[in-house]
Amino acid sequence: MRPEPTVYVIDDDDAVRQSLEFLLKTASMRVRGFDSAKAFLQELPAIESGCIITDVRMPEITGIDLLRRVKECGLDIPVIIITGHGDIALAVEAMKIGAVDFLEKPFDDDLLITAVRSALNKDASSARHRAELAEIHDRLAALSNRERQVLEGLVAGNANKTIAFNLGISPRTVEIYRANLMTKMAANSLSDLVRMAMTAGILDKPDKPGR
């Protein structure tokens, strides 16, 4: 089961951090606060879902540096940057690195909550996509080499007779392989199979008969 998403608030200003924690908790969100990026990074390996709110200016490790480290470790979690007056250039830099949003102080409470909910929805959508992709790759791994060749022929738009000719087998044998791979891929239709192939990136690969 996917863990409950958490909003991670990172700010060296105790008053600001505690205010944000209180606001988000009143909006029925699960919140954890950190007084430095360093403290948060120690917890990073155990984090799987949620979103990050971080001040752009902090001692030792800035919000920009934190964002870079999160991206470098491969954690696909939305990051919202909080900026002060005159920090627009830093906010734009953060967006280029991968921040999903930035808010200028002082910000409206409703605006913050809306931004966080949007980030959590984005994270949930990304998690669903990752889970779907992992499941598709597991199914692909269960295919035999010949079933994989038939699959690549199908998603390339080839008819059974063309696939049979390319692979040097009979159309009836292609039908058998096709039925098997539809079962293994848990595909209800050819369009379902093509959608899974697109998700896994198979359509980007050219069909190579007789491999």
Image (cartoon, grey):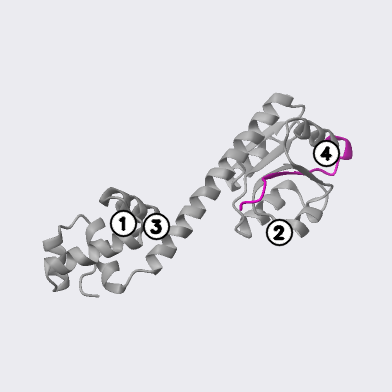
Percent of width and height locating residue 149: 26, 68
| Numbered tag placed on residue 125 in the rendering | none
SS for tag 2? Answer: helix
Percent of width and height locating residue 6: 70, 45
Amino acid under disc 1: Leu
* Mark with earlier residue (3, 4): 4
Asked whether the residues under the numbered discs 2 and 3 touch, taking CB atoms below 8 Å apart as contact, a structural biologist would say: no
What residue is shown with label 4? 17
Amino acid under disc 3: Ala
Up the image or down, 27 lies above or below 150; here it is above
- For image coordinates 63% across by 60% down, the residue present is 73
How far apart are labels 1 and 2 at the CA level? 35 Å
Q: Would you say residue 120 is visible in this rendering? A: yes
How far apart are labels 2 and 4 at the CA level? 22 Å
SS for tag 1? Answer: helix
- Residue 12 among those drawn in magenta: yes
What residue is shown with label 3? 200
Asked whether the residues under the numbered discs 3 and 4 touch, taking CB atoms below 8 Å apart as contact, a structural biologist would say: no
Amino acid under disc 4: Arg
How far apart are labels 3 and 4 at the CA level? 41 Å
* Mark with earlier residue (2, 3): 2
SS for tag 3? Answer: helix
Mark 1 crowd level (few <14, some 14–19, many ≥20, 10 Å Cα): some
- Front of the two marks 1 and 2: 2
Is 34 placed left or right of 182 in the picture?
right
* Mark with earlier residue (1, 4): 4
Instruction: Decide which of 15, 199 is in the foreground and name it.
Output: 199
Q: Which residues are magenta?
A: 1-17
